[in-house]
Image: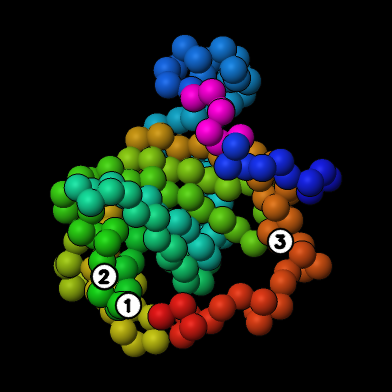
Amino acid sequence: MDQPLPDLRAALDGAERITSEAQLDALYGEPVPAAVTKEIDHVSPHYRAFIEKAPFVLLATSGPEGLDCSPRGDPPGFVKVVDAKTLLLPDRRGNNRVDTLRNLVRDPRIALLFLVPGAGETLRVNGRAEILVDPVLCEAFAMQGKPARSVVRVTAERVYVQCQKALVRSRLWDADSRIARGELPSVGQIL
């Protein structure tokens, strides 16, 4: 940061709140045309290539208790593109909180954010999902001899690439921006 931060508590107390779309539009103006035209309702061949190279995706869901955003990762290509509208995502054994899956059985809306190491752009897929437990499907996603616990089928409704500004500013992929793991509390310390 270039300047010292002001007293943020005082700034929060006096800050004007944006409470309408009209205020938001007045503040930000019209979207750049390319930001609107890049959105399509299916997975194009270019978007498919991005998904097939992604070893990491964030899943956002909503349920009665609130929102959830969960990471998923496996070797690149672990999310399968069946056709222009259908993605399959394995769910592996974990801590059994199943927040994402619990949300999906109550509200099928889902948002995916795909990341590819070294690529500045991200890919967003918004749609609807359902949880499948077919043994053949689960076995098709086996890793180290263990089938997927379930498979999430995502029907794409809105698909678009996000520009690289956030990843460039964050320097996420820059090796010299990494911190030593010891600078953060361990999971054991947090628990």
Q: Which mark is residue 173?
A: 3
**Cα distance in 3D space between marks 3 and 1:** 27 Å
User: Which quadrant, please, contains the C terminus?
Assistant: bottom left
Q: What type is the residue that disc 3 sits on? A: Trp
The count of marks equals 3
Residue type of the residue flagged with mark 2: Arg
Circles 1 and 2, Cβ within 8 Å, touching? The answer is yes
Q: Residues within 10 Å of mark 1 (few under 14, many from 20)?
A: few
Q: Indicate whether 178 appears above or below 108.
A: below
Residue to which mark 2 is pinned: 97
How far is disc 1 from disc 2 in space, using C-alphas?
A: 8 Å
Near-viewer residue (18 or 109): 18
Q: Name the side, left or right, on which 179 lies relative to 40.
A: right
Q: Residue 3 location, x and y as percent?
A: 82, 43
**Where does the image place residue 81, in percent across and percent down from the top left?**
40, 53
Spatial separation of the CA atoms under disc 3 and disc 2: 30 Å
Residue that carries the numbered disc 1 in the rendered image:
94
Residue 182 placement: quadrant: bottom right
Residue 1 shown in magenta: no
